[in-house]
């Protein structure tokens, strides 16, 4: 209980869940630009902080052993925040943080975990979990489909646009035997847990490449699933506009505009996020399906797991992805037991309607 954990962006969609998962276990210092409607708690200190003000940020970091950054857009904020935190020899966790220059931070004594969320985060943990489930079986191919019908914040939208524009991942690409291969045409069907109108786009970020390699999987395909029929057109138009400028204010306005367009085109009010895994070994094929009603809970839980790992002292100095330091089996079991992820079973109404035939994996 003696390690003070600082949480920046504590009142945001992800930050609130990080606070909920850690409060009562560790003393917390919760920072946000405006402190409103924060519940009194003897283990939580609330601090007003503008993370773009270096002096305020340095003051916030005082006495912290770990700082978790839940602010956004990460592409504009994380680099400076990580620099300040590491300069003061404080361990650092970022729920996105893909734009951080790792070379600048290697000489510090801090331990850093980047991509401590859902995507990236859980996305890299899944291949490791699949390897544990299959033990020593040769895994010939894994298909992972993930997506849903969710509200998106302007900050998350800006991060997605900038990460895509900066080629954080390879579009229409997949992992195969320690190489990146280009997809000529997608022949996979959309899994039946998704709406009939959903579209899939193949994508290979660095995290998933490294996780597939680490997990000794022969071939891995990651598919982003989109239920918004106008999604592709809206994003492509925004990416073209990013060629004009990547200045902070310009991108914020662009992200707000994209967010508004996506919300206007949502065809379903209920929010959900689903994951479908298809695993092929030498001897069998297995499928697993999961649904989350709020993927922000996944983000918050993964970040909290990372904080607990740092507090336990299991990590040496370095920069890590969550899959490199967390026990994938414990993470998945916790997400399921806490009903953050809900298993989609063979007898679910959705599955019965489509007469889906598959061998269901057992946890």
Image (cartoon, rainbow, N blue to C red):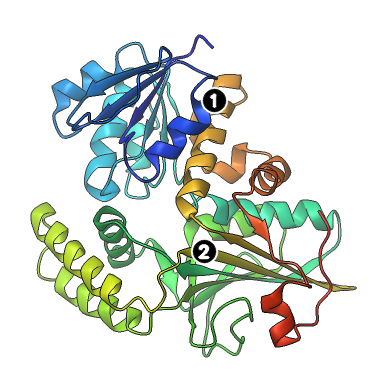
Res 175 label: none
Spot the residue most to the right: 283
Question: Residue 132 at x, y = what percent?
Answer: 78, 51
Question: Residue 125 at x, y = what percent?
Answer: 62, 51
Give me the residue at 9% from left, 54% from top: 249
Q: Residues within 10 Å of mark 2 (few under 14, many from 20)?
A: some
Q: For the N terminus, give its image quadrant.
A: top right
Is any atom of residue 213 visible in this view? Answer: no
On screen, residue 132 above or below 16: below
Foreground label between 2 and 1: 2
Front-lying residue, 361 or 92: 361
Res 273 label: 2
**Which badge, 2 or 1, comes first in the chain's sequence?**
2
Res 310 label: 1
Image quadrant in which you'd find residue 235: bottom left
Give me the residue at 48% from left, 69% from top: 148
On screen, residue 109 above or below 209: above
On screen, residue 336 above or below 276: above
| Real-space Cα separation, disc 2 to disc 1, in angstroms | 28 Å
Q: Secondary structure at mark 2?
A: strand
Give me the residue at 41% from left, 64% from top: 150
Question: Residue 25 at x, y = what percent?
Answer: 55, 20
Q: Left of 359 or right of it: where is 311?
A: left
The tally of labels here is 2
């Amino acid at each position: 209980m003696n390690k003070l954990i600082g949480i920046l962006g504590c009142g945001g969609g992800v930050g609130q869940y990080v606070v909920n998962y850690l409060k009562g276990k560790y003393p917390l210092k919760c920072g946000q630009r405006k402190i409103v409607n924060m519940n009194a708690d003897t283990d939580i200190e609330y601090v007003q902080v503008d993370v773009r003000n270096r002096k305020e940020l340095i003051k916030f970091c005082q006495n912290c052993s770990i700082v978790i950054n839940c602010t956004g857009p990460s592409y504009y904020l994380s680099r400076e925040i990580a620099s300040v935190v590491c300069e003061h020899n404080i361990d650092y966790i970022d729920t996105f943080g893909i734009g951080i220059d790792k070379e600048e931070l290697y000489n510090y004594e801090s331990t850093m975990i980047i991509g401590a969320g859902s995507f990236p985060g859980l996305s890299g943990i899944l291949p490791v979990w699949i390897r544990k489930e299959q033990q020593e079986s040769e895994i010939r191919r894994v298909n992972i489909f993930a997506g849903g019908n969710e509200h998106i914040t302007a900050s998350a939208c800006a991060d997605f646009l900038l990460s895509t524009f900066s080629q954080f991942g390879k579009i229409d690409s997949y992992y195969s035997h320690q190489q990146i291969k280009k997809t000529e045409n997608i022949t996979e069907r959309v899994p039946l847990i998704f709406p009939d109108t959903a579209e899939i786009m193949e994508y290979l970020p660095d995290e998933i490449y490294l996780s597939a390699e680490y997990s000794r999987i022969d071939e891995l395909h990651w598919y982003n699933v989109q239920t918004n029929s106008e999604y592709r057109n809206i994003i492509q138009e925004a990416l073209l506009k990013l060629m004009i400028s990547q200045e902070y204010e310009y991108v914020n306005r662009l992200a707000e505009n994209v967010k508004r367009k996506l919300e206007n085109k949502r065809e379903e009010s209920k929010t959900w996020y689903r994951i479908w895994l298809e695993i092929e070994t030498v001897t069998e094929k297995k499928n697993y399906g999961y649904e989350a009603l709020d993927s922000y809970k996944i983000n918050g839980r993964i970040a909290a797991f990372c904080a607990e790992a740092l507090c336990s002292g299991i990590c040496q100095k370095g920069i890590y992805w969550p899959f490199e330091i967390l026990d994938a089996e414990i993470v998945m079991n916790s997400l399921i037991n806490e009903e953050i992820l809900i298993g989609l079973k063979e007898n679910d109404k959705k599955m019965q309607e489509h007469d889906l035939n598959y061998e269901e994996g057992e946890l």
